[in-house]
Image: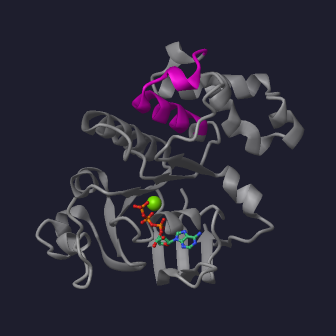
Amino acid sequence: MTTIQFKGVTKTFNNGFQAIQSTDLTIHPGDFTVILGSSGAGKSTLLRMVNGLETPSQGEVFIDKRKLTPQNQRHIRANVGMIFQQFNLVNRLNVMTNVLIGRSYYRRWWESLFYLFTKQDYELAHWALERVGLTDKAWQRASDLSGGQQQRVAIARALVQKPQIIIADEPVASLDPATSIEILELLLKICQEDGVTVLASLHQVNLAMQFADRIIGLKQGTVIFDDQPVNLIHDSLLETIYQKEDHETIAVA
Ligand SMILES: Nc1ncnc2c1ncn2[C@@H]1O[C@H](COP(=O)(O)OP(=O)(O)OP(=O)(O)O)[C@@H](O)[C@H]1O
Ligand SMILES: [Mg+2]
């Protein structure tokens, strides 16, 4: 099982905006950790630094004590499955091919380009589709599936990477409440059964309380709380993460 460490990590964008203030965090192996925070808090920025989609301006990210560098990024990325709010499937391709794309990390670029995959890749893809309950949809066009089903395809695509880590950036923000619960249950099951370290960002406090082993509250790029859900039930900090700053006004249409 895999540990993620942020050591003195800051992120300042080219325009000078500091999205992540100096942050030290250790994400424990096999945990389901949820980052909670309002829009603009820095959730995506923090998550994207785990697989090199963003690089820290200062400090370092370690995956199992291995520092993330441009040189080992490709190798580390293979071990990190990514789940996004908008699913990020290739709509015109069928479900099976979308899942196989998760194997691209282990293929040469031209093999991926022509969708050349091995028998073992197909076996893994079938296994992953069974895992997410979509065996019967394998040959349908991705865009013909419902949102919840598309997110399951994205999870299957991550599973064929045989990842040690799954990063899920607002995985349920585009889904209805019942489907959101199904998707989080699936991610939790994968976390518990496969020992995958899951780091997810969410907007909803109730879902974080229900699913997380640990909740990290982020506000304006700073960790403002970090605890198990049971310890946060009566914590007023939980409410403060969504409070507007005094000088901010809420426009009423
Ligand atoms: N490439 C960029 N250049 C400049 N500023 C950026 C860039 N990417 C993000 N930001 C800013 O950094 C802050 C944090 O953004 P981030 O996307 O991490 O927030 P978030 O918590 O994921 O928000 P949301 O819930 O809306 O997805 C925001 O104020 C955003 O405008
Ligand atoms: Mg985001």
**Which residues lie in the magenta part?**
139-157
Magenta stretch: residue 152 in it? Answer: yes
Using residue 22 as the reference point, say whether residue 215 is left or right of it: left
Magenta stretch: residue 46 in it? Answer: no
Q: Nearer the viewer, residue 11 or 229?
A: 11
Residue placed furthest toward the left: 234
Magenta stretch: helix, strand or loop mostly: helix
Q: Nearer the viewer, residue 53 or 228?
A: 53
Using residue 214 as the reference point, say whether residue 18 is left or right of it: right
Q: Residue 194's x, y, as percent?
A: 49, 43
Q: Quadrant of the C terminus?
A: bottom left
Q: Nearer the viewer, residue 82 or 27?
A: 82
Tell how many labels: 0
Can see residue 6? yes
Using residue 4 as the reference point, say whether residue 34 is left or right of it: left
1 up-or-down from 68: above or below:
above
Residue pictured at 27% horizontal, 55% vertical: 204
Q: Residue 73's x, y, as percent?
A: 73, 62
Quarter location, residue 33: bottom left
Quarter location, residue 158: top right
Using residue 70 as the reference point, say whether residue 35 is left or right of it: left
Q: Quadrant of the N terminus?
A: bottom right
Q: Nearer the viewer, residue 68 or 240?
A: 240
Q: Residue 9's x, y, as percent?
A: 55, 81
Q: Residue 248's x, y, as percent?
A: 26, 79
Residue pictured at 63% horizontal, 36% vertical: 160
Can see residue 108? no
Tell me, what colour scheme is on the image? one colour
Residue pictured at 49% horizontal, 43% vertical: 86
